[in-house]
Image: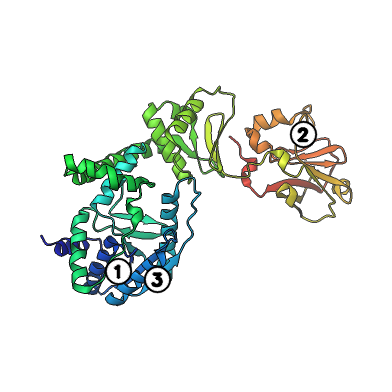
Amino acid sequence: MHASELLSRALDDLPPVEGSAGVAFSAGPDSAALAVMAAEWARRRGLRLWLFHVHHGLHQDADAWTDRAADLARRLDLPLLVRRVKVDSDDPAGIEAAAREARYGALADMAAEAGVATILLAHHLDDQAETVLLRLLRGAGPDGMGAMGRETWKEGIRYLRPWLAVPRSRILAFMQAYSARSGFEAVLDPSNLDTRYARGILRAQVLPAIERHWPGYRSTLERFARRSAEVAALLKEVAQADLEMIQEPRPPYGNALRLSALNRLAPARRAMVLRLWLAGHGMAAPPEARLREMIRQLQDAAQDRQLLLRHGDMQVRRYRDHVIVDSRDSRPPAARAASVEFRWDGEPSVRLDAMEGTLLFLIEESGIDPAWLRNTGLTMRRRRGRERLQVSPQTPSRSLKNLYQERGIPSWERERLPLLYRGDVLVYAAGLGPDARTPRASPGVRLEWRPDHPGATVMF
């Protein structure tokens, strides 16, 4: 089959596209071929086609490459959008990953400007083989070995890769013929063979050696990627079924895990469930060693021990038989305001920004004597330790620590619950209620603490 026919058929096999589409267009041979072929494909379907070019600024000839992109856009009579991006060369993930993220961000920005929901990418069989090898060498599991998908979504944009099963040699053959006819010369990016980068090493050194002994390696790796994707989908179904059995909603933390049920799973299933659960909280999968350590601590920690595992900006906490993800303010108590003084003049509520909440003064049939609270110095402050509260006239005062434990309020939440004082007298403990020794009246005041972060009164 002629190269142009092969490429055209691959485009015709794409899922339906309505209205308009874009082509991620670097002006290199692969994306230039896609622009040429997609122009005819779009005309046949009555689609408006855009070319999206990202100027990374990483090469001295980047301006010339943008000019080359504009040249082909004119030849094809297609609109071209260009975005300049700044790539963080010090990104911990590496410059290749940083450039990729910048590129996808720019593509999404141009798609929004053009009103495009679908972007075509020129990835081909050789790219797929490289991706599989790189992920294998970096230790990816079955869920990562599926490599690139023919149809994927990112930030609301659908990306289609029509040529994943097409060898690059066929694309280059088409572009050579097109260049001979039109005089257009595609960009040749020297970084593609730069051995400072992982893909450059593969292309310049590793893959040529593999091809000498296993010329069919591309199709073999592509088949492996497809089978890995099937296995990953099956494993995800198993993990999802396990997760649904052992999680339960715990506002404001989303879904919490029942630790006893998690630990009854086989180790491999336990790891899959944790990855899926963390992903559901928007957390990147931890490295394998860190995941193993997380599993070990969750399994071996004493029943009365509260566990804190930091992962990125979030915290995985264990309290009693639950494991939760806490994404809220993780500053230690010492870094927050220790106290705030104010007066109450009879208003229904007092906003206390320093305590991150609002104190309500609700008038009810019976409660704290309003005259005793009004127009006197009140202080809202954090716990200091050893505080005691008498919850009813019939019981003695008890330590706040024991009272909070009985209520099932975890220690990290207790740190967020302030106490109200009148002078040196403890009037009210958020999450517990008033001290029974405060003067009473009818009608009276019922105090209620409304934290900005509702989890401050969560109970397990």
Q: Amino acid at mark 2?
A: Arg
Within-10-Å neighbours for mark 1: few <14, some 14–19, many 20+: few
Residue at mark 2 to residue at mark 1: CA–CA distance = 63 Å
Can residue 129 be seen here? The reply is yes
Q: Is residue 119 left or right of residue 283?
A: left
Q: Amino acid at mark 3?
A: Leu
Q: Quadrant of the C terminus?
A: top right
Q: Position of residue 338 (x, y in %)?
A: 77, 42
Q: Position of residue 62 (x, y in %)?
A: 40, 64
Residue 20 vertical placement versus 300 (above, below):
below
Q: Is residue 109 left or right of residue 334?
A: left
Q: Which residue is mark 1?
A: 18
* Picture disc at residue 384: 2
Say which label, 2 or 1, has the lower sequence index.
1
Choose mark 2 or mark 3, whichever is in front.
Answer: 3
Q: Which residue is mark 3?
A: 81
